[in-house]
Amino acid sequence: MIARAAQKKEISAYKDRRFAGTQVEYEEALQTSVTVYVGNLSFYTTEEQLYELFSRCGEIKRIVMGLDKNNKTPCGFCFIIFYTRDDAQDSVKYISGTILDDRPIRVDFDWGFEDGRQWGRGRSGGQVRDEYRTDYDPDIHFFLFHCSFIFSHAFADLN
């Protein structure tokens, strides 16, 4: 009975509701995937920081930063694609919960990155969960204001 319960253990707490296949296909994809989803990132976290941290678990093939679909600014998540399953497993095992830019990051197996998944799915362009949060990253407002200020002045200089 205990062995059966252990087999039913969830592979990943992260659920992608837009996965096109069945639940069985989803679980099989998670079992073999070399991709991890990284959540709760600061809006200031860079690809270089992620590379430095996650390369301790193995060779990284690609890092895809999650972006606000409207502003094209980071919105707190990314996908990291490794070359081997063992390296992905090590990142889930050892890095999930690590503090990066003063935030505990979440690392879960993902079924695999496809183009288009890098965009936030919320109505505002960012992550859906940010629209329901009562606690939020107060720096995001400064960050978005700063980015829009820079972009507006850059385009004004072109005219």
Image (tube, helix red, strand yellow):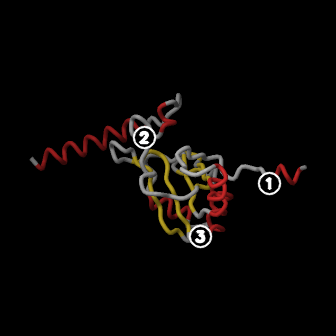
Residue 102's spot in the image, x, y percent?
A: 54, 46
Tell me the residue that label 3 is attached to.
58
Disc nearest the viewer among 1 and 2: 1
The answer to whether 154 is drawn above or below residue 50 in the figure is above
Residue found 61% across the figure and 66% down from its top: 57
Based on the displayed image, in which of its 4 quarters is residue 112 positioned? bottom right
Residue 99's spot in the image, x, y percent?
A: 59, 50
The disc label shown at residue 126, or none = 2
Outermost residue on the top side: it is: 134
Tell me the residue that label 1 is attached to.
7
User: What amino acid type should be assigned to the residue bearing mark 3?
Assistant: Gly
The tally of labels here is 3
Q: Are marks 1 and 2 in contact (CB under 8 Å)?
A: no
Q: Distance from label 3 to label 2 (Cα)?
A: 29 Å
Q: Secondary structure at mark 1?
A: helix
Residue found 42% across the figure and 38% down from its top: 139
